[in-house]
Image: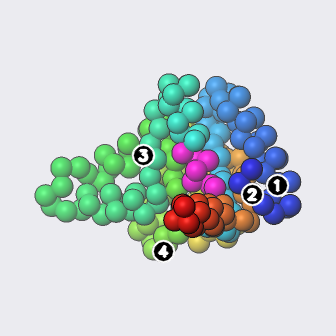
Amino acid sequence: SVYKNRESIASIDIMVKAIKYWLTNFDTMYENGKGLYLFSNTKGSGKTRMAVSLANELIENKNVPVKFATSMQIIDEIKATWDKNSTSTEHRLIDELVTTEILIIDDFGTEEVKGWISDRFYSIINGRYIEKKPTIFTSNLSIDNLDYDSRITNRIKEMCYVIPFPEESVREHIADQNKKELLEGIKS
């Protein structure tokens, strides 16, 4: 009900069915390491909200641990391990990201891809691929438009169902509604 454009309303029905299929068959998805790649070029289209809802569903109803982090948080955590006073190591952090039951990487592809960043994400994604650990990605880019090389993108294509979100910002609709509520409230 949050989408207004006719095209968005038509596509959201298919998207919701695909996500429900993944959830309904979660045991098989988990066993096969099958995750989701949720993308839309439009910021505010509902990708992160859906990923958070999926995390809550998996935690509450499937009793599965979930780690949620933006790609920039992961990069910052890796950098923090380089500090000589750090109590964590890069190897331990990457191992935790590889072995966590479900990993959600939000805003994947927003980072500037440097060689070391690509190497670390390759280690994480390849490790999860080998271990058959489901990963959920959200991104403003289709897999083919990511700046990562094919070692990463091919693994994501194989290990995830790719689900395009509508090219419509629900945040803008919510902001408009908030403005209307405020104006109505101060008129009283």
* Residue type of the residue flagged with mark 4: Glu
Nearest the viewer among 67 and 6 is 6
Find the magenta span and give its range.
46-52
Residue at label 1? 9
Residue beneath the point at 79% across and 40% down = 17
Residue 56 percent location from the top left of the image: 52, 36
Work out how far the residue at label 1 is from the one at label 4, CA to CA, in angstroms.
33 Å
Work out how far the residue at label 2 is from the one at label 4, CA to CA, in angstroms.
31 Å
Q: Secondary structure at mark 3?
A: helix
* Residue type of the residue flagged with mark 1: Ile
Residue at label 3? 97
Nearest the viewer among 1 and 121 is 1
Q: Is residue 152 magenta?
A: no
Left or right: where does residue 83 sit relative to residue 107? left
Q: Secondary structure at mark 4?
A: loop
Residue 122 percent location from the top left of the image: 50, 57
Circle 3 residues within 10 Å: few <14, some 14–19, many ≥20: many
Residue at label 2? 3
* Residue type of the residue flagged with mark 3: Leu
Q: Name the main secondary structure of what is drawn in magenta.
A: helix
Is residue 148 visible from the viewing direction of this image? no
Work out how far the residue at label 2 is from the one at label 3, CA to CA, in angstroms.
34 Å
Q: Judge depth for marks 2 and 3 and give the one in front.
A: 2
Answer with mark 2 or mark 4, whichever residue precedes in sequence.
2
Q: Is residue 48 magenta?
A: yes
Residue at label 4? 112
Circle 2 residues within 10 Å: few <14, some 14–19, many ≥20: some
Answer with mark 3 or mark 1, whichever residue precedes in sequence.
1
